[in-house]
Amino acid sequence: MEQLSQTQNTVEQTKTVLQRIGESVFDGKSLLILLASLATAMIVGAVMAQILRGLSRSIAKAADVSTDLATVNRLRRLETSTIIAIAIIRLFLLVVAVYFWWVYTHEGGSRPSAVIGAGALTAVLLGGMLTPLLRDFSFGAGMMAERWFGVGDLISIDFPNVQGVVERITLRSTRIRGLNGEIIWVANQTMNGVRVAQKGVRLTAVELFVTDPEAAKKMVDRVNKLLPGGLSLLVAPLRIVEIADRGDAIWHITAIGETAPGREWILEKTALETFIKLDEKRKKPILIVDPIARYADPDMERQLARAVRNARKKRRRINYRQAIKPLVTKGKKSPSSKP
């Protein structure tokens, strides 16, 4: 009976606390204090964000002028952390503002069990209303903890179909500058997977099978002059990395070029068509077959070669009979114990 009466008292206290919360929220003075607290938090957050954005721009400029790749990666991680700090500070200030309003307008307090019950009920109600926002926050926090990407990375998102440079990361969304200059906002919870361009470029190899290697070298130089260049297009022109004699007047030439992400068509399509057109204009064509384009990332090729080598290894089978036979023979030769 004592427990039942204590439970009833707790329920009554919870109702009282909820009633006080409702009265305090809709009270003019309390509402004014809440709005003033939130406004102060937003103003302080805006000032802090402005300072941190200026710091991030300075870090970005330092990364752009640096020639050391390790230094660039370290500065970009610092830039990403600075941008993330803006979202964390703003959220923290809002929580502090609400806490200040609660403490200031609810002096005297109530029983701890009643406050806990009212807080739990309020949390359930707010959780139902803010579930989409909380889901975005949880996805964003997970992405940041796992370091999917950082500010300045070139990324591709299959759904929604987005490709561009990351400009800003928050707990709820990510801002991307598209290849056509558009600003794209993506909710973090919609990112099922992200592709990040390593070193900011795509390496493409062009395979040529020709009858005259010297003429092929001149053709490669000619094609480079006919392709659009620049850091946002053809970053590095085609350069010959391998010439192999296959015999019977067949030469295999491999040329590698670098393009910005999303501009692979320069080497995968335009360059191949240019090779074919230049060869057709020659009095004596040198191309035996049409040129071939493929990906040429060195890290991927090493991993692929390792996987192929491991797959071709012979699997050793253990003959358990042969392994046990010496033990059995040794047991038979051992003298038997006498009674």
Image: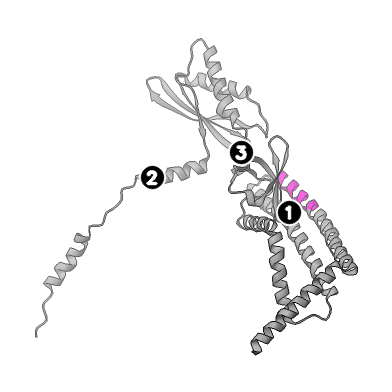
Contact between labelled residues 3 and 2, with CB atoms less than 8 Å apart = no
Task: Find residue 339 and report its horizontal and vertical position in percent.
Answer: 9, 85
The answer for how far apart the CA atoms under marks 2 and 3 are is 28 Å
The stretch of residues the image draws in magenta is 53-64
Tag 1, which secondary structure? Answer: helix
Nearer the observer: mark 1 or 3; the answer is 1
Q: Which residue is mark 1?
A: 83
The answer for how far apart the CA atoms under marks 1 and 2 are is 43 Å
- Image position of 158 with respect to 93: above or below: above
Contact between labelled residues 3 and 1, with CB atoms less than 8 Å apart = no
Q: Amino acid at mark 1?
A: Ile
> Around disc 3, counting alpha carbons within 10 Å, would you say few (fewer than 14), some (14 to 19), or many (20 or more)?
many
Task: Find residue 286 and report its horizontal and vertical position in percent.
Answer: 48, 17
Q: Residue 21 versus residue 201: which sits nearer the camera?
A: 21
Residue 274 in the magenta stretch? The answer is no
Q: Is residue 70 visible?
A: no
> Around disc 1, counting alpha carbons within 10 Å, would you say few (fewer than 14), some (14 to 19), or many (20 or more)?
many
Residue 201 — which label? Answer: 3
The residue at 51%/9% (across/down) is 283
Tag 2, which secondary structure? Answer: helix
